[in-house]
Image (cartoon, rainbow, N blue to C red):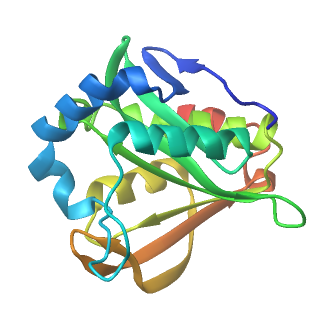
């Protein structure tokens, strides 16, 4: 896939490919932030076959998907310290040229601009290197922190999806936001700075 693997940096914030060597830092962050992440965390419905993957299994699956041009799994680091994860997923080529972005952040870094910078870097990379045309982000209506991210970035709300994703043990509604390359010709980082 064009533009993968890649390392993106803005100030102290870096996006780099998620690796199996991140296992300890990822697990430590997830345990430390369990209560903080639980209301927003994707879960597997009980009627689904199989069980949730291990971290290594998840990284192997995402790495395979990245090789096939279907995803870009990033670790978010701040000053070289693991701080969260951002994944560009559901990459569709052909006449669509779009993808979705999802993320989580260690509570220690919340409110410090790390997520808006990470999302802006990922969107710019998707538009100007990977050649995508549209990026979508879906957010639970109660997730005020993530709603603030799309507000800072100026993404437009385009819909409301009832019972869209299985989150925290239930099918949850989501607000849907999107941006196209025409809406930010100078880039999302430029928009964020101004």
Return the x and y of residue 132 as percentages of the image width and height: 79, 50
Quadrant showing the N terminus: top right
Quadrant showing the C terminus: top right
**Residue 48 sits in which quadrant?**
bottom left
Furthest residue toward right:
95
Can residue 194 be seen here?
no
Return the x and y of residue 123 as percentages of the image width and height: 64, 43
Q: Residue at x 37, y 60 (%)?
A: 147
Return the x and y of residue 151 as percentages of the image width and height: 45, 56
In-image side of 148 versus 73 (left or right): left
**Position of 163 relative to 141 (above/below):** below
Q: Nearer the viewer, residue 56 or 131?
A: 56
Furthest residue toward top:
79
Q: Which of 40 and 169 is in front in this view?
A: 169
Return the x and y of residue 173 as percentages of the image width and height: 36, 81
Q: Nearer the viewer, residue 193 or 52?
A: 52
Q: Which residue is drawn at 44% across and 30% down?
A: 75
Can residue 12 be seen here?
yes
Furthest residue toward bottom:
162
Q: Nearer the viewer, residue 29 or 152?
A: 29
Count of numbered marks? 0
**Position of 66 relative to 114 (above/below):** below
Q: Which residue is drawn at 32% across and 82% down?
A: 171
Q: Which residue is drawn at 54% across and 81% down?
A: 159
């Amino acid at each position: 896939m064009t533009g993968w693997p890649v390392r993106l940096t803005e100030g102290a914030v870096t996006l780099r490919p998620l690796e199996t060597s991140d296992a300890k830092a990822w697990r430590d962050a997830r345990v430390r932030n369990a209560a903080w992440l639980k209301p927003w965390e994707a879960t597997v419905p009980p009627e689904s076959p199989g069980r949730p993957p291990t971290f290594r299994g998840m990284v192997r699956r995402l790495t395979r998907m990245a090789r096939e041009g279907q995803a870009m799994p990033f670790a978010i680091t701040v000053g070289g310290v693991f701080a969260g994860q951002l994944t560009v997923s559901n990459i569709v080529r052909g006449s669509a040229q779009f993808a979705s972005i999802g993320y989580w952040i260690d509570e220690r870094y919340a409110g410090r601009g790390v997520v808006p910078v990470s999302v802006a870097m990922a969107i710019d990379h998707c538009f100007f290197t990977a050649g995508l045309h549209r990026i979508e982000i879906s957010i639970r209506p109660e997730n005020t922190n993530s709603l603030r991210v799309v507000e800072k970035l100026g993404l437009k709300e385009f819909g409301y999806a009832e019972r869209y994703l299985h989150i925290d043990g239930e099918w949850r509604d989501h607000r849907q936001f999107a941006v196209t390359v025409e809406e930010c010709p100078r880039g999302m980082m430029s928009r964020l700075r101004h």
